[in-house]
Image (cartoon, coloured by chain):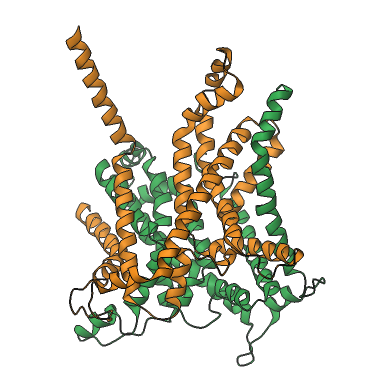
Amino acid sequence: MSGNTRRRTGALIAPYSIWALLFIAVPLFFVAYYAFTDNSFGFTFGNIARFFTETSRETGSRIYIDIFMRSLKLAVISTAICLLLGYPLAYFMTRASAKAQKIMMVLIMIPMWMNFLIRTYAWMTILQDTGILNGILSGLGLGKMHIIGTESAVVVGMVYDYFPYMVLPIYSIMAKMDYKLIEAARDLGCNGAQVLRRVIIPLSIPGILNGVTMVLIPSISTFYISQKLGNGRFFLIGDAIEGQYVANNLHFAAAMAFILMVILLVAMALIKYLTGRGKYGEGAKA
Amino acid sequence: MKTASKIYTAFIFVFLFAPIVILLVFSFNEARSLSVFSGFSLKWYRELFRDEATLESVRNTLLLAVSAMVISTVIGVAASVGIDRLRSKWLKTALKTATDIPMTNPDIITGISLMLMFVFAGRLFGLANSLSFWTMLIAHVTFCLPYVILQVLPKLRQMDPALPEAALDLGCTPRQAFFKVTIPEIMPGIITGAIMAFTMSLDDFVISYFTSGAGFQTLPIRIYNMTKKTVTPKMYALATLIFFVILALLLISNLTDDDALRARKERRRNKTKKIRGNEQ
């Protein structure tokens, strides 16, 4: 490479390198900096310790650990429901005609392109005590159900909002799958369940992993869905961070963001390690 | 099995569209009620168009999205070409890792991290409130950049490296080879990346929420503030309008997508062939 070309390459990546350093790397440093300092910027473990130790005066349980576990629980449930509902849909889509596949793709993308605030808001009006669902239920003489403000309502919101993020990656992997492999498995004596377990699912693992991360990460960190469909001020970890931000407790907000980030990084590294061979998609080739 | 899969697919699409249909229907409701339809009326649309703050937030959103799209596309395309040419392995890995961070981090962490830096920098310069249009623009460019790079890089890899070399051999300056050969070759990636950047910026709420100042409201933040208090069918009217805009955009992009373009080109080519045949 001549000096000239090298200089040109340098000029091309310089703006992005500076941008990434200033606005991706440095801000993450500030999360750690705020997390480990007090209001006068003196070093402290207090914020991190508070997350793990602060207990509720009434019940004596650990407030923030409880909040985190609830976030984890609801996010895992929502992700599992998205996977269970989305996986068959992705498979059926690949079996449809090219034109039907295209139409279904657009149909899945339309709700995704509508702002998630509006999507969540729509469910709020459906699930309200005076909402449409209860209107239908009482019209049928089934009595009213109190759904809004419960964990189930939050799960419904998460599943609805993030469902497309599960279907699209699985579908795009399945669409590339060689259908001859399924036929071969059938010819060699596999029944339907065996084909699914031994051929279809192993081949679609990269899509599943992609879909799971794309649903799990936004649902574990959401705060709007839980504010609109759930109840209470500090319902999920996202609510807790947002609440501390609004209260201008930036150091404690940073500490919670830092802990969440570390947990997610460890979890993702673990997933990568367990599924083997670095990046998603490479593991399935072997 | 066939009918079972059809019923299942239909059930899922009913689940996906029922809430949207409900919004649509009740945006025309005369009364404020959200469960009883009492009569057709356009009054919520009239109210929406009288709401100056919402209209201004639409203008703000478009201004921000266009600015973020242009800046992130220019920086992102340059970065992709640079990364593609880089020989240094560790620099390549470092830049790719930086690109992955905003994609994998939850939005709330990206938002909080930028906000903390802006607040800290603001303190250094003695500003009481450092969050403004500019901090929001920086945040939007930051989360749009990875989408541009991830669209453009594969196109560069698919390109035959002999093409720009041939241009150089035929007497182009490096600049001419870049603009006349490389850029047209990777154009589909640039366009997809730019569109993705635009829609991501348009749609973002969480990162905007943490990096926006009091004076500059985008539509998602306006929606957030409106839904904080009471439920009003004005929101339904807004959602309905957004729905039809998205529907139109998707239909247009579907009509102009690869297949349609190819078919049209084919037709044109046949026509010219026919004309040429007649001439001979």
Foreground residue among B248 and B130: B130
The hue of chain B in the figure is orange
Above or below B97: residue B228: below
- Residue A263 in the figure: left or right of residue A43: left
Outermost residue to the bottom = A58
Q: Residue at x 70, y 22 (%)?
A: A1
The hue of chain A in the figure is green
- Residue B231 in the figure: left or right of residue A49: left
Q: For residue B229, which quarter of the picture?
A: bottom left
Foreground residue among A78 and B92: B92
Residue A183 percent across, percent down from the top left = 31, 39
Residue A220 percent across, percent down from the top left = 53, 67
Q: Residue at x 51, y 30 (%)?
A: B183
Q: Quadrant of the C terminus of chain B?
A: top left
Q: For residue A141, which quarter of the picture?
A: bottom left
- Residue B65 in the figure: left or right of residue B32: right
Outermost residue to the top = B280
Q: Is residue A97 visible?
A: no
Foreground residue among B188 and A183: B188
Residue B30 percent across, percent down from the top left = 22, 78
Q: Residue at x 64, y 59 (%)?
A: A266
Above or below B83: residue B220: below
Q: Is residue B70 visible?
A: yes
